[in-house]
Image (cartoon, rainbow, N blue to C red):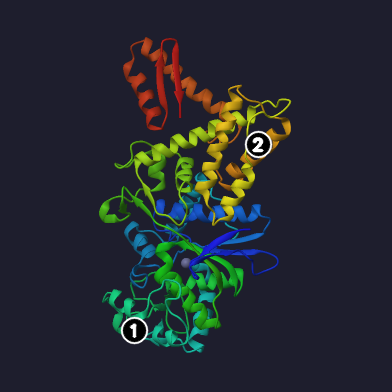
Amino acid sequence: MLQIYNTLTRQKEYFRPIHEGYVGIYVCGPTVYGDAHLGHARPAITFDILYRYLQYLGYKVRYVRNITDVGHLEHDADEGEDKIAKKARIEQLEPMEVVQYYTNRYHHDMEALNVLPPSIEPHASGHIMEQIDFIQKILDQGYAYISDGSVYMDVEKYAKDFHYGILSGRNLNDIVTDTRELDGQNEKKHSYDFALWKKAAPEHIMHWHSPWSEGFPGWHMECSAMGCKYLGEQFDIHGGGMDLMFPHHEAEIAQSCAALGHQTVKYWMHNNMITIAGKKMGKSYNNFITLQQFFNGEHELLSKPFSPMTIRFFILMAHYRSTVDFSSEALEAAEKGLSRLKEAYSRLMTLKPAEKTNIELFDLKEKCNEAMDDDLNTPIVISNLFESAKAINTIYDGKATISSEDLDKLQSTWKTFVVDILGLIMDDTAGSTSNNNAYKGAVNLLLTIRQRAKQNKDWATSDEIRNALTQMGFTIKDKKDGFEWSL
Ligand code: ZN
């Protein structure tokens, strides 16, 4: 039976769904004002695994992952310019053009990583009415106040009746010393109060009517409003990166309790952070490597391009609650591991059954189930697969045999765990056999042209083809009687 670590109770708990009909999951999605990087890939992949595994267990899952397209301000989520409006101003675009452009690119990257699309992908800007209603409820309950057209959560009042800090473990005193003095702070009673609605400054281009002012919702509000709308006032799982635990998720809990009198979420799940060569990702370190840069290798910290499946595999090699440190060397090791797994997979699919099995086969399915049930322990699943690969290679080398029944079982277990649950595409050169043949044919054709150019001493053409293919990630070896290549 599945156990997951609940950040709220700080322990592993057996997963018991609230509703009969479906499991509700809400995950905080991206703020779409730039290209997706590793910080986006990790939660997307972590909760993709949860989504896939719950479906494998037979649950019908309603998976909501939002798009933040308004209200996420530059400083502490609550002060400064709107991130999307700023990008629109600099690029001289309509804010919704920025949103559409980066949403499309985000989808493209997620598809490359084989992250399944969510069941519902609501936009914050499409749910202004729901957010206004939610804020009104908080005001009606007396846990918010209006100040110069903006609405703020009255955290001190809230903390008298509820536990503010229940998720993050912070208390009000810690928060006071943490909070920097910022513009607009004088509108608030206390520095730790956060905005539910902000009155728009004249230069602010994204704004809507509300009972309080022409303005826009605070960032934390969208997830409370959209979570309730699509999953109900109580739902199963809320996920996101650990960096969102405070203030974002703590604020979501406060908003729900203030408006509804109770929490909405049963299990809170947080993936840990990614560091790059031991450092936090940050603009000052120049280590914000976008996913596109990983895929094409165009970043000074990368030795070469890495395929989306290598990135996915690398993330899954660590438990989602551990930190992951990215480096070119670590990715190269993951790439080698993945190709060993792929080799075993393709060998397994071509094995011929014999009369009987004369090699020790452990119960791979049971071991993988056990690991997944233990808070989605993907590294243990992977190590079980490598253990199983040893037996596959022995049979492939003709040193052992496998019965038809055992072979069927082994093939279906590998398909289930590698392809369906870990979501690893085993042939990522192309989608279908005909595509695959066309692609191989095209590379062979280019290399044949290159060979002819070399015979004609046309070094420019020969080098051009070689360099272009190498850039794309191909390894080319010249041989006496032709060439050899791999991706
Ligand atoms: Zn959120």
Query: Residue 292's spot in the image, x, y percent?
Result: 41, 44
Mark 1, residue position: 188
Q: Please identify the quarter of the rendering in which residue 470 is found.
A: top left
Tell me the kind of residue under disc 2: Gln
Q: Is residue 91 left or right of residue 265?
A: left
Q: Secondary structure at mark 2?
A: helix
Q: Are marks 1 and 2 in contact (CB under 8 Å)?
A: no
* Residue at 53%, 80% in the rendered image: 133
Mark 2, residue position: 411
* Residue at 59%, 31% in the rendered image: 392
Q: Is residue 437 above or below residue 197?
A: above
Give the total of numbered labels.
Answer: 2
User: Can you tell me whether the CB of the residue at mark 1 lies under 8 Å from the nearest atom of ligand 1?
Assistant: no
Q: Nearer the viewer, mark 1 or mark 2?
A: 2
Q: Quadrant of the N terminus?
A: bottom right
Q: Nearer the viewer, residue 182 or 128?
A: 182
Q: Secondary structure at mark 1?
A: loop
Tell me the kind of residue under disc 1: Lys
Can residue 210 be seen? yes
Q: Quadrant of the C terminus?
A: top left
Can residue 35 be seen? no
User: Can you tell me whether the CB of the residue at mark 2 lies under 8 Å from the nearest atom of ligand 1?
Assistant: no
Q: Is residue 164 above or below residue 438?
A: below
